[in-house]
Amino acid sequence: MKNIIKLFLTVAVFFMGTGVFAASALEKFLSPNVDVYEVRASHVLVKTRKEAVKIKKEIESGEITFEEAAEKYSLCPSGQKGGDLGYFNRKQMVQQFADTAFDLKVGEISDPVGTQFGWHIIKTTAKR
């Protein structure tokens, strides 16, 4: 066991010394959103997962745009603005919602996400 630890430490020191294993590269690898402090997202909020799945299918099939779905179905007042919540950081939203919004690519739409407020379909529209 001691030999394995020594080998690991030797390899780690070697890579750190050559700059291949720089801390900033490791941080970016472990957290691809390390430079993202805020996202701008829109959402559609409904009561049940079944409703959310149905609405997402409508959006994916092109029957309705995301913004139209928010105006038509969302229980959140933001629905009147196409679901736009503006920019927010991770601490301003409940964890499940924030994690999803930060993990989405710009323009990507999530699968239904459940929170204590209901079921959300989230679309990330910008990151900064």
Image (cartoon, grey):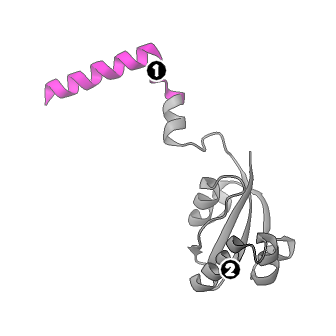
Q: In the rendered image of this protein, does residue 39 appear above or below residue 118?
A: above
Q: Nearer the viewer, mark 2 or mark 1?
A: 2
Q: Which residues are magenta?
A: 1-24
Badge 1 crowding class, 10 Å Cα cut-off, few under 14, some 14 to 19, many 20 or more, is: few
Q: Position of residue 66 (x, y in %)?
A: 76, 70
Quadrant where the C terminus is found in the figure: top right
Give the amino acid at mark 2.
Answer: Ile
**Magenta-drawn stretch contains 12:** yes
Please identify the quadrant where the N terminus is shown: top left
Residue 79 image position (x, y, % from top left):
81, 76
Magenta stretch contains residue 15: yes
Q: Residue at x 75, y 80 (%)?
A: 74
Looking at the picture, tell me which residue is in the foreground, 28 or 72. 72
Image coords of residue 35 (percent x, y): 65, 39
Instruction: Quadrant for residue 125, please give it.
Output: bottom right
Do the residues under discs 2 and 1 have CB atoms within 8 angstroms?
no
Chief secondary structure of the magenta span? helix
Q: Regarding mark 1 in the picture, which secondary structure is present there?
A: loop
* Residue 22, x across and y down, in percent: 49, 24
Q: Secondary structure at mark 2?
A: helix
Sequence-first disc among 2 and 1: 1
Q: Is residue 65 visible?
A: yes
Residue 117 seen in render: no
What residue did someone put label 1 on? Answer: 20
Q: Is residue 12 above or below residue 82?
A: above
Residue occupying the point 66% across, 75% down: 56
* Left or right relative to 67: residue 39: left
Which is nearer the eye, 26 or 108? 108
The residue depicted at 35 percent of the width and 18 percent of the height is 13
What kind of residue is marked 1? Val
Q: Which residue is mark 2?
A: 55
Instruction: Pick out the residue farthest to the right.
Output: 81
